[in-house]
Structure formats: C-alpha cells, structure tokens
Image (tube, rainbow, N blue to C red):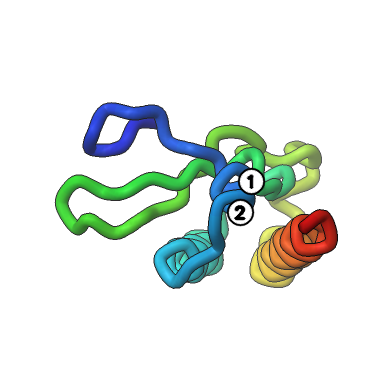
Amino acid sequence: IRGPDGQQAESLAQRLDRSYDASCKMALAEFKSFLLEHLIRIGDLHPSNLMICRNDSTQRERLFIIDGLATRHFLWWPLFYPLRPFKMRSKIRRLERRIDHYLSRKQADT
C-alpha cells in the first residue's frame, strides 16, 4: 500500500510511535465503523497488521488490513452468523486495548 506520494504506507504501530493525532483517530473511527457495518471475518486485529495512509482524492487518512483476514473457525462460522456483531465488537475492543497499552508503554518510556 502506497500513499499519493508513492511512499510505502506505515503501519498503525509505526504511526502510534510518531503521533496519535486527530487524523489518526478519525481514520480509526471510520475503520471501526466499516468493520461493524460489513462484519468482515477477521482473525485478529493488531496495530502492526493495519496500514495507514492518505487517500488521493479526499486527502484523509485511511486504515487498511494487510494480514489477519478470514477466521480461524472457518467450518463453524455459518453456525455463529448471528453472533458476528458481538464478535466484531469484541475484536474492536481488543484492538482499542492494544492501542491504549501501546500508547501507555510509549509514554512510560519517555
């Protein structure tokens, strides 16, 4: 994934090292909304599996999943279809906790 300038996008983990500004927070909020709306099967969300870059047309930052798509429970997934919204909210909460932990660890190092 490359930005409009042709440079490789950075991972969310790299971005959190640099800054967690309003643009990054907005990209994360839009990403979480997209996940809840479309209920995409995701194994696990990690800041290192998400790339962030600026969109050409809107000039707003967006998050992209580069690893962890699909589910570990592929055969059982149709039986759990009604639980998908709950599962997705759980994965999003886990991502938020990981981001909070990452930021608090970074703050403790400085």
Q: CA distance from mark 1 to mark 2?
A: 5 Å
Q: Nearer the viewer, residue 105 or 32?
A: 105
Q: What residue appears at the point 42 percent right and 35 percent down from the top-left corner?
A: 9
Q: What residue appears at the point 29 percent right and 59 percent down from the top-left corner?
A: 60
- Farthest front residue? 110
Q: Quadrant of the C terminus?
A: bottom right
Tag shown at residue 13: 1
Q: What residue appears at the point 61 percent right and 54 percent down from the top-left corner?
A: 16
Q: Is residue 76 left or right of residue 9?
A: right
Amino acid type of the residue that numbered disc 1 sits on in the rendered structure: Ala
Helix, strand or loop at label 1? It is helix
Amino acid type of the residue that numbered disc 2 sits on in the rendered structure: Leu
Q: Which residue is mark 2?
A: 16
Asked whether the beta carbons under mark 1 and mark 2 sit within 8 Å of each other, the answer is yes
Helix, strand or loop at label 2? It is helix
**How far from the left and from the top, in percent, is residue 36?**
55, 67
Q: What residue appears at the point 54 percent right and 58 percent down from the top-left corner?
A: 19
10 shown above or below 16:
above
From this viewpoint, is residue 87 visible? no
Q: Residues within 10 Å of mark 1 (few under 14, many from 20)?
A: some
